[in-house]
Amino acid sequence: MELAITKSDNLKPKPNDADLGFGSIFTDHMFNMDYSLEKGWHNPRIEPYGDIALDPATMVLHYGQSIFEGLKAFRTESGNIQSFRPQENFKRLNSSARALCIPEVDENFVLDALKELISLEKDWVPGTTGTSLYIRPTIIATDPFLGVRASHTYRYFVILSPVGAYYAEGFNPVKIWVTREHVRAVRGGIGCFKTAGNYAASLFAGEKAHALGYTQVLWLDGVEQEYIEEVGSMNIFFVIDDELITPMLSGSILSGITRNSVMQMAGSWGIKITERKISINEVMDAHASGKLQEVFGSGTAAVISPVGELKYGDKIINVGDGKVGPLANRLFTEITDIQYGRSEGPEGWIVPIA
Ligand code: COI
């Protein structure tokens, strides 16, 4: 497929690195590609960033047939632009596509198209440590039709956003509310895929968490409301008695690429890692007996995010005296060193872009 490029003649001013938050500023161009039953994926094009006109009956607006990814590009000290494990994101995009009856994309083609897009937008990639270019590939169902079925047409698009830290806390510990009242997903559903609907399902409890003074929700399993799943914007890890424990991928938890990177890195350092069911009561008990050393989350947007406080019912526990734990700190340093080109990661993790 030939990639068409139309450049914008109305370039926007670029923000200062120091002012960057998360996800509110977008670059000058975007990538678009369409799907129809007759043509398959076709008309790949880079064009000026702009609105997508949709018929009010468009299926994604009614039934939420939408999937997305989140990955980042980084500027190294020598000025090169590189991405962190992007192949994994496109693999996961296709696994989400299969789950929502969306046609798969050619992973090599969309990676090459992404490189073209970022090369065109390379001046938008911020250079300060802690900043990056967040990349949001998305697929939406575009049939104008109100019957419930999979759409026959789709739009794949990629937008780019220069970002700083995801949480206002930066790398300082966040406070998390553990809820038994709400569940995010159940096994056999779509919780393990990156679908818009999972995030819609998380909003009500998220608002409650904010009202209580907490940053995010820690979700428990949808059946017994006992076993820890994930935070929604990140996977979760516990250090108990020098062992690194994370909930196993039960079918309702997102298979995070940073989660996988954490396990590979910690494993290579000789740390004992276990993926298993872990209940909230086990975590509370570990805290009571002084064995809960660290809690932290992992995610593309969140990187490594230490958790300083957990509220579960009437119980509030403080982890690590409000300080960043040594393992979270080491993981954050080593992962960001690889991302910013200060050290070499395992083979294939870094993909040069421009
Ligand atoms: C990410 O970490 O990239 C995510 O997708 C989480 C959130 C910003 C939706």
Image (cartoon, helix red, strand yellow):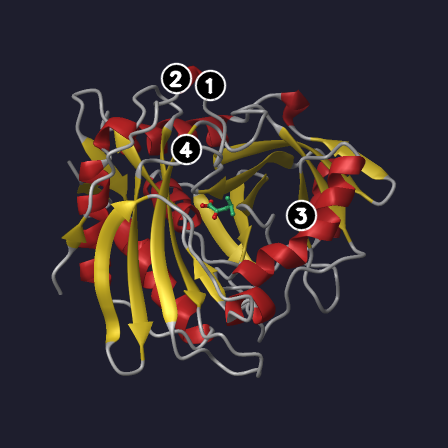
| Camera-side residue of 83 and 354 | 354
Distance of mark 1 from mark 2, alpha carbons?
5 Å
Q: Which residue is mark 4?
A: 331
Q: Which residue is mark 1?
A: 19
Q: Are marks 4 and 2 in contact (CB under 8 Å)?
A: no
Query: Residue 344 at x, y = what percent?
Result: 20, 33
Closer to viewer: mark 4 or mark 3: 3
Distance of mark 3 from mark 2, alpha carbons?
33 Å
Q: Are marks 1 and 2 in contact (CB under 8 Å)?
A: yes
Residue 154 appears in the picture as rendered: yes
The verdict on label 1 being within 8 Å of ligand 1 is no
Tell me the crowding category of disc 1: few under 14, some 14 to 19, or many 20 or more residues within 10 angstroms, Cα based.
few
Mark 4 or mark 1, earlier in chain? 1
Q: Report the amino acid beneath label 3.
A: Leu
Query: Residue at the location (74% across, 43% down)?
Result: 207
Q: Is residue 239 left or right of residue 100?
A: right
Give the farthest residue toward the left.
2
In the depicted structure, whether residue 97 falls above or below residue 309: below
Q: Which residue is mark 3?
A: 218
Q: Dot 4 lies on which element?
A: helix
Q: Which residue is mark 2?
A: 16
Quadrant hosting residue 314: top right
Q: Report the amino acid beneath label 1.
A: Asp
**Numbered circle sitting on residue 40:** none
Q: Dot 2 lies on which element?
A: loop
Mark 3 or mark 2, earlier in chain? 2
